Image (cartoon, rainbow, N blue to C red):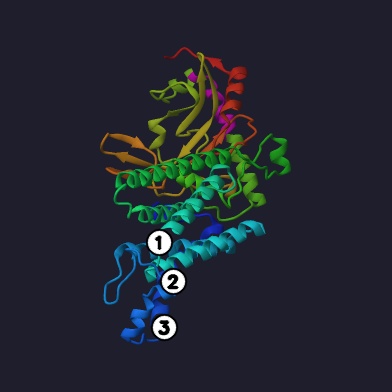
Amino acid sequence: MNQWQTFLIGIAPDHVPALLAGLLLPVAVLLGRRLRPARVPATALDQTATSPVLGLSSGRDRTSPGQPRTPVRAWAAWLLGVAAVVHLALPIGHSDGWLLTAGFLGSGAAFAWLAVRAWEGRTWRLWSGLLLGATLLAYLLVAGTGQEEPDQVGILTALVELLALGLCLMPVRRRRFLSSTAVVAVTFVVGAWIWVGSFAAHAAAGGASASAGDPAGAAAGIDHSGHDHGHDHAARAQAGVIMRPATQAHPTADQVRAADALALATRQAMARYASLDAALAAGYTLPLAATGPDVHLDNKAYASDGRVLDPQRPEKLVYAIEGGRATLLGVVFVMERAGVPGPEPGGPITRWHAHNACLTVLPPGFTIVDAFGTCPALSVSITTPEMMHVWVVDSPAGWFAEGLDKEWVRAFHAAHGLPFTAR
């Protein structure tokens, strides 16, 4: 899965109109300039246009006749213009109340007004800085309280607004250190908060589940885990988890039966690995960190045996290992090569996911994507092969959930953990 596909997966559907509006802004400006009537070159008019009579500022940002527009004002106008069209287009995709819609429209109109002021050489920094600070704070509050998941469009808009805020603080020459420090601090806080919001939304989405039951599956004790696929992919993408987009909202009857069969077959086959010692004897190996509520054991032989989604030979086992006891929780089926999609016999029930990671050069090692959905400097992005969890315990999250609640796992392990001898 390439970076462009990753970017698209991380976009919330109701933010698509805002993204398109931002992309079409340069086209609209170009057409507007071409359709605008030719300017009459009158010296008297030019002098009048820059006079204080029309209310224009005499500050350092004003463009004098015959002088080119400064790069700072040009960049500020474009950045404020992008923020304007994004905010104006957000109500198209959002089905929110009138108060939030009014907020989007009001902030969009204000950004547009300030963009025009910056382009024409009038004062813009103070009001732009206040508005940018207010919108960034509002976004952080919404994202941090779980009302909206940070997605690629929201993060890109935050970056645009951070750049514009930096331009607002540039002219403070005597306090350049303070203004630079303020920009760095705001960027750090915004990025850290977005990152925290992404992980919180990821955890909430991973723990949420809904049954898509059928009588046979319910009788067998199977809970078909599902998610609200309209939003959860966005936060997972920012948290380094790439969910393949669902091609359908609900499974068919045949897909439900196929998911039932896969879950039952896996549960029956894994009964022989209830003991951790049996799993180790079969070729599964413990990681260096071999304690915790979700310890993953790999089997290198099964990882390259050419078998896909075989309940008898899962590539990974997942145990809870604490206090000298181990509890088998489930398996992880893993494709052999990255970029090759795994089969989905249960349709939206049996969804695969991959992980985005960053291979760092200095210091050497691995990390996840940063707060703005990219790898840090001196690192390269890699994507793991697709994988899918099948849990063999009757958890509230269901047998095909992306993860299990840690507190539930600890309670279950305390009641069902088996001692083991391997060290």
Give the Cα distance between marks 3 and 2.
24 Å
Element under label 2?
A: loop
Tell me the amino acid under the disc marked 1: Leu
Give the Cα distance between marks 3 and 1.
22 Å
Tell me the amino acid under the disc marked 2: Gly
Residue displayed at 56% across by 47% down: 142
Q: Which residue is mark 3?
A: 36
- Please determine whether, in this image, residue 142 is positioned above or below residue 67: above
Tell me the amino acid under the disc marked 3: Arg
Asked whether 197 or 291 is in front, the reply is 197
Q: Position of residue 419 (x, y in %)?
A: 53, 13
Q: Earlier in the sequence, mark 3 or mark 2?
A: 3
- Taken as a whole, is the magenta stretch helix, strand or loop? helix
Q: In the displayed structure, does residue 224 sit left or right of residue 125?
A: right
Q: Which residue is mark 1?
A: 79
Q: Position of residue 145 (x, y in %)?
A: 58, 42
- Name the image quarter holding the C terminus: top left
Residue 219 sits inside the magenta stretch: no
Element under label 1?
A: helix
Q: Which residue is mark 2?
A: 55
Q: Position of residue 45 (x, y in %)?
A: 36, 83
Tags 3 and 1 in contact by the CB under 8 Å rule? no
- The magenta-colored residue range is 266-276
Tell me, yes or no, if residue 96 can be seen here: no
Q: Position of residue 128 (x, y in %)?
A: 44, 58
Q: Identify the image quadrant of residue 167.
A: bottom left
- Please determine whether, in this image, residue 414 is positioned above or below residue 220: above
Count of numbered labels shown in the rendering: 3
Checking the image for residue 101, the label placed there is none
Mark 2 or 1: in front is 2
Q: Earlier in the sequence, mark 3 or mark 1?
A: 3
Residue 268 sits inside the magenta stretch: yes
